[in-house]
Amino acid sequence: MSRATALLVCSAVTTAATAGCSGATGSRPGGGAPAYTVTPNSPTAKGSLDSFTWSLYAEPYTLDYALAYDYPPNTVLANVCEQLLRVTPDMKIEPGLAVKYTNPDPKTWVYTLRPDVKFHDGSTMTADDVVASLTRHMDPATGSPWGSSFKNVASIKKSGPLEVTIRLNKPDVLLNELMAASPGTVESAAFLAQAGKDYGGPKGKVNCTGPYALDSWAQGDSLTLKKNTAYWDRSLTPKADTVTFTFIEDPSARTNAFLSGTADGGYMVPSSSLTQLRTNSKGTLYFGPNTAAADLAVLDFKGPLGDLKVRQALSMALDRKSIIKAAAGGIGIPAKAPAARGAWALASEKADDYFKALPEPDFDVAGAKKLIAEAGATGRKVTLVTSSLAPEISVVANAVQAAGKQIGLDVELKAVAPEAYSSIFVDPGARKGLDLVITNGYDNTPDPLEFYQYLRTGDFGNYGNWSDAEFDAAFDKANAEPDAARRAELTAELQRIAVRELPIIPLYEAPYSVFLGSRVTGAPTGIAQLYYPWAATIGAAQQ
């Protein structure tokens, strides 16, 4: 779901009536601004490069696949480590390190592995490596935020030299789909056994199968990848010999790096610079498919926000169109549900009907003030965490505080350092004393059910420990449904419950973004870059 957010514009759609990706267009609320197009890829590269430099908005806190739960680490790891399945730029799931899978009965998944795949150290991938990599998520000592994804697993065993069988306690369709994300990552078992506590950190290494291998990590400065000349997928042979990631937290400095050419590109462009980067001559800003929406996640249901009327009132007091203008450069639409329309790629043809059936987000200050009074919450304090991690966070936080003041709710802002903000999403202790956090709720797969998994009772991504028996029962029914169309219908019911109960208050959706300097091209433009080996597709814009 939401990770340590940069809260930078997201979602695969650009208008309220559009649920698709390629070719979708939209314009800023209020009109007058140039239309924008959402496509899954930038133009194909015309040649190779010795190297290129990529800007991240923050340094990865780890390259341990089991702990990677945010944009910076996954953006790097997408090119270094691979999963049993793969999410493509147009948000489809295809074979990855597993050449195929079968579901012989509702509680069994069997994966046939691709032969002759080499790790970066030259050793050959086997079923033992897959078993070791997946079961590591289930070990409490690992502390994997993905551990709850394996909640229904009874066993993961080698069932042949190139075959792994997962047996479940009850049907779990999502587990299979998440084999295309961090839960399905394969690392060398031998390397894991000898790596120790430095694994995935600046002093350690990783040993995976991707098109690039980790070369060096200068903590606080940069990280460099080198081309894997033995990479198995010849259709994704890297076009650049090396990739250097630089870490630039300041949005203005990051924009200047794009315009000066010291960074050839970067995902999740600062929204404060969208206009400048759309009209410059130094490169091109692209908008791509996304599965994310900006939301307010409730962290404490024992305080004022435990009352549904208070949550409804706060939602009604938010002027989403103004928030979009200030926080997302005017590019986006008000969110009607916690999961964005772009999260419905698996059932994109039905998503529009599902969203049309939802109520429009009201902007009714008088009605909201009345609800606060009815709840007896007038003058009560709600603490919203904010941070300098991204300017959008401060913009939204100030808007929420102002909305609270209008309706008689005392919204107190608690500013924390970027690393502390990130901790909120992985450390329950970091949420103590907080009522709300601004999140970027996204799916790692094309299935919207994944997002709603994180609202199940006890799930790791259920930050506020919300619990609803009706929701849990509906989720279990959906997760046992193998037919994608029927599962989408069941997920729509989960969406209706979430909108009715508001454990998460939806804010806005907007497209993903990537800036490419004039000398490079070929990058996927959307959120699939978190798991697709995007750097391998980047090459020279000119021959």
Image: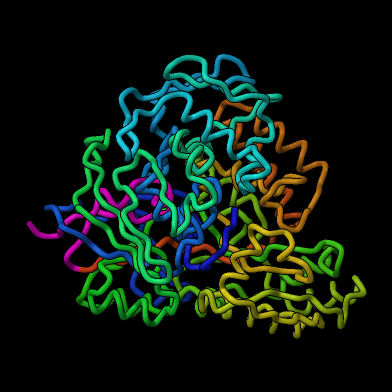
| Residue numbers of the magenta segment | 518-543
In the displayed structure, 275 sits above or below 538; it is below
Question: Taking the image as drawn, is residue 12 in sight?
Answer: no
Q: Where is residue 539 in the image (x, y as percent from the top left)?
A: 19, 55
Magenta run includes residue 529: yes
Which residue: 23% across, 56% down?
242
Residue at image position (27%, 58%) is 243
Quick one: which residue is furthest to the left in this view?
543
Left or right? Give the position of 470 relative to 329.
Answer: right
Number of numbered discs visible in the structure rendering: 0
From the viewer's perspective, tell me whether residue 43 is left or right of residue 346: left
x, y percent for residue 493: 69, 42
Closer to us: 141 or 311:
141
| Residue 229 location (% of width, % of height) | 21, 41
Q: Say if 351 sits above or below 378 in the image.
A: above
Q: Is residue 261 visible?
A: yes
Tell me what residue is drawn at x 15 percent, y 57 percent.
49
Percent from the top left, x then y, of residue 14? 44, 60
Q: Quadrant of the C terminus?
A: bottom left
User: Quadrant of the rendered structure where residue 508 is?
Assistant: bottom right
From the viewer's perspective, tell me whether residue 280 is left or right of residue 61. left
Nearest to the observer: residue 486 or residue 116? 116
Rendered view: 103 above or below 367: above
Magenta segment includes 356:
no
State the residue at coordinates (38%, 57%): 288
